[in-house]
């Protein structure tokens, strides 16, 4: 069968005046229009294409790269709004539709929103919903403390940033753990800091424990090399100065330069730290 909203590995069956017809093992066929056909595509070979529905509600294949696959979360911009709903730019010729019933607040053209892409079983159409929370699951956790995870920053809260973890869970990055610029829609790597009662997941944007300290030391060392061997920062610098220059907390900065000093990599001066040549 053809998988709408996903990549499919299909066999090239025949060339026609409108494009190539591709098939899956059970015999279902889909058209790859001429504008996506390349010279290296040969009858009998397989090709990887994305399958969705065109403006006439027919399955169609494309070699374009969508910004979002089925059952995934993303941050997409609204191109147009009409009496039926909103239409999002997801990188394909046909825009992605969000019915009004799937909007938390009325969407506006030019704004971007976190959405979830799903296949509506009633209409067999790909739709997006801004009610993304209902598609996350923290009942059965697939992560544990210390795990490296992929994050999508979903929204700001009073405590910090809610993040979507591995396209499956929801977690929180507290503001006091943020030492670099973070924006809604940003994708980044994070680390599971703590799993609290009720399967609430606290996430750090930096490695935890010894590895984290080593990473900070490496960052300081590289910055020293690129700045002529000197940084006008030391343990008397303000937390704001350190965060602005290095995207780390003063606590982590002090640990890192302490380690570098003990190894004889740097010297500590009144005005800053200097690389030992």
Image (tube, grey):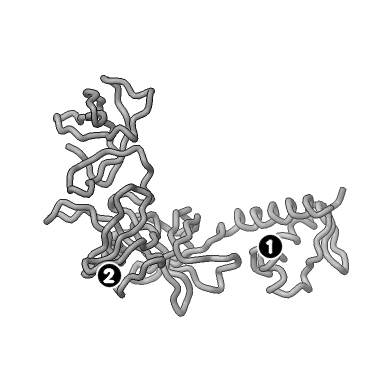
In the foreground, 240 or 268: 240
Neighbour class for label 2 at 10 Å: few (<14), some, many (≥20)?
some
**Relative to 235, is 59 on the left or the right?**
left
Numbered circle sitting on residue 259: none
Q: Position of residue 128 (x, y in %)?
A: 27, 59
Quadrant in the picture for residue 34: top left
Callout 1 touching callout 2 (CB < 8 Å): no
Q: Can you say whether 154 is above or below 238 in the image?
A: above
Q: In terms of sequence position, does the residue under pointer 1 or pointer 2 come before the other?
A: 2
Reading the image, the residue beneath label 1 is: 246
Q: Tell me the residue at 65%/68% (across/down).
A: 249
Residue 195 visible (yes or no)? no
Q: Can you say whether 116 is above or below 16 in the image?
A: below
Which residue occupies the extreme front position in the image? 17
Q: Tell me the residue at 76%/72% (across/down).
A: 237
Residue 241 visible (yes or no)? yes
Secondary structure state at the residue bearing disc 1: helix
Secondary structure state at the residue bearing disc 2: loop
Which residue occupies the extreme bottom position in the image? 158
Q: Can you say whether 51 is above or below 16 in the image?
A: below
**Relative to 132, is 163 on the left or the right?**
right
**Relative to 143, is 261 on the left or the right?**
right
Q: Tell me the residue at 71%/60% (across/down).
A: 256
Q: Position of residue 241 (x, y in %)?
A: 72, 71
Quadrant in the picture for residue 33: top left
Q: Tell me the residue at 30%/26% (across/down).
A: 46
In the foreground, 225 or 11: 11
Residues under labels 1 and 2: Cα distance? 39 Å
Numbered circle sitting on residue 103: 2
């Amino acid at each position: 069968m053809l998988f709408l909203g996903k990549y499919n590995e299909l066999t090239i069956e025949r060339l026609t005046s409108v494009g190539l017809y591709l098939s899956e093992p059970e015999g279902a066929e889909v058209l790859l229009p001429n504008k996506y056909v390349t010279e290296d595509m040969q009858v009998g070979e397989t090709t990887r294409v994305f399958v969705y529905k065109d403006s006439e509600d027919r399955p169609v294949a494309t070699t374009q790269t969508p910004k979002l696959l089925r059952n995934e979360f993303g941050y997409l911009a609204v191109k147009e709004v009409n009496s039926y709903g909103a239409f999002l730019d997801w990188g394909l010729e046909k825009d992605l539709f969000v019915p009004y019933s799937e909007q938390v607040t009325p969407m506006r053209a030019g704004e971007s929103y976190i959405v979830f892409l799903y296949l509506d079983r009633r209409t067999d159409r790909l739709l997006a919903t801004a009610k993304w929370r209902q598609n996350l699951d923290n009942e059965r956790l697939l992560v544990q403390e210390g795990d490296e995870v992929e994050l999508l920053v979903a929204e700001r809260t009073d405590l910090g940033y809610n993040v979507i973890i591995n396209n499956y869970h929801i977690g929180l990055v507290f503001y006091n753990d943020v030492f670099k610029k973070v924006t809604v829609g940003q994708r980044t790597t994070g680390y599971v800091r703590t799993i609290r009662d009720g399967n609430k997941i606290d996430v750090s944007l930096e490695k935890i424990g010894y590895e984290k300290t080593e990473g900070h030391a490496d960052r300081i060392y590289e910055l020293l090399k690129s700045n002529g061997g000197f940084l006008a920062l030391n343990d008397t610098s303000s937390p704001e100065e350190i965060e602005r220059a290095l995207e780390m907390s003063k606590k982590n900065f002090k640990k890192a330069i302490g380690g570098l000093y003990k190894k004889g990599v740097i010297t500590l001066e009144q005005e800053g730290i200097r690389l030992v040549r």
